[in-house]
Image: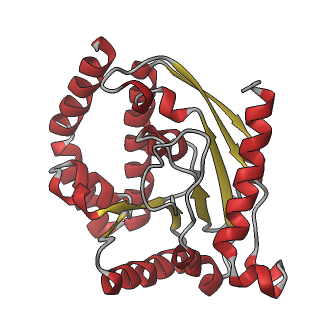
Amino acid sequence: MIRFIILVCFVVLFLVCSIPLLIAEWIIGKFNMDAKNKSSLAIVNWAFRCCLFISGTKVTVRGLENVPKDEAVLYIGNHRSYFDILITYIRVPRPTGYIAKKEMLKWPLLVNWMRNLHCLFLDREDVKQGLQIILTAIEKVKSGISICIFPEGTRNKVNHTFMEFHEGSFKIASKTGCPIVPMTIYNSAAIFEDHLPKIRKANVILEYGKPIYPKDLAKEDQKRLGAYTRDVIMNTYAKIKEEAGE
């Protein structure tokens, strides 16, 4: 419980103390949006790294060379833990917005930082709003902002399993031509979700697959980008699981 308490205290302290930074970021954005994007990315990366340090999380990263650095991408990953966001965000090479559930809008200050980072908030019960979010994400990618989605739609609570990847998310790639970067996350639930409310030291593996360009796939695979990407991540996960002897 001590790690949990320390982490909560750090997050609250960071959010409160960051109020002047939010004001500064707002002013910077009025004159230079690119500078604001870079500074917001750096500030949140620092905070996330501190959270991972406090939690005792060790991350082994593989395939980082597969992430294009000169263009916006669509990151797609499996989702078992709240910590998946921290683990993946600290490694993005350019401004990246995550698609989050609308409930995050209730958290003051945190939501301000999320908006600074181009995050979008999805109402999973509203199909029309969901379509608008996808259209907004498409425009973000066209403007050079990467997007990250966990297309299972929610955290998978069953270890070593995968839920269906919602195909609608992949329109961001098919409509823009941006590469899909598969992210396989292994053992992240061991940090927190496997033993709520305790936070324990854990070794997590994050493996980036080779970028998938929709236009290079067979027409049948282009129609089922979600299933195709899910298969890639599932195969990588199975490989990591075998290496771990589980």
How many marks overall? 0
User: Which is nearer the eye, 245 or 184?
Assistant: 245
Q: Picture quarter containing residue 99? A: bottom left
Q: Position of residue 58 (x, y in %)?
A: 57, 23
Please state, as top left, top right, bottom left or bottom right, where the C terminus lies in the image: top right
- In the displayed structure, would residue 152 be above or below residue 200? below
Q: Position of residue 50 (x, y in %)?
A: 40, 27
- Left or right of 140? Residue 30 is left
Res. 164 in view: yes
The residue sitting at 16% across, 44% down in the picture is 19
- Left or right of 8? Residue 49 is right
The residue sitting at 59% across, 60% down in the picture is 75
The residue sitting at 54% across, 45% down in the picture is 88
Please state, as top left, top right, bottom left or bottom right, where the N terminus lies in the image: top left
Q: Position of residue 238 (x, y in %)?
A: 75, 42
User: Which is nearer the eye, 212 or 227?
Assistant: 227
- In the displayed structure, would residue 127 be above or below residue 12? below
- In the displayed structure, would residue 159 be above or below residue 162? above
User: Which is nearer the eye, 57 or 240?
Assistant: 240
The residue sitting at 42% across, 56% down in the picture is 154
- Left or right of 89? Residue 67 is right
Q: Position of residue 80 (x, y in %)?
A: 49, 43
Q: Picture quarter containing residue 179? A: bottom right
- Left or right of 229? Residue 123 is left
Colouring of the image:
secondary structure
Res. 70 in view: no
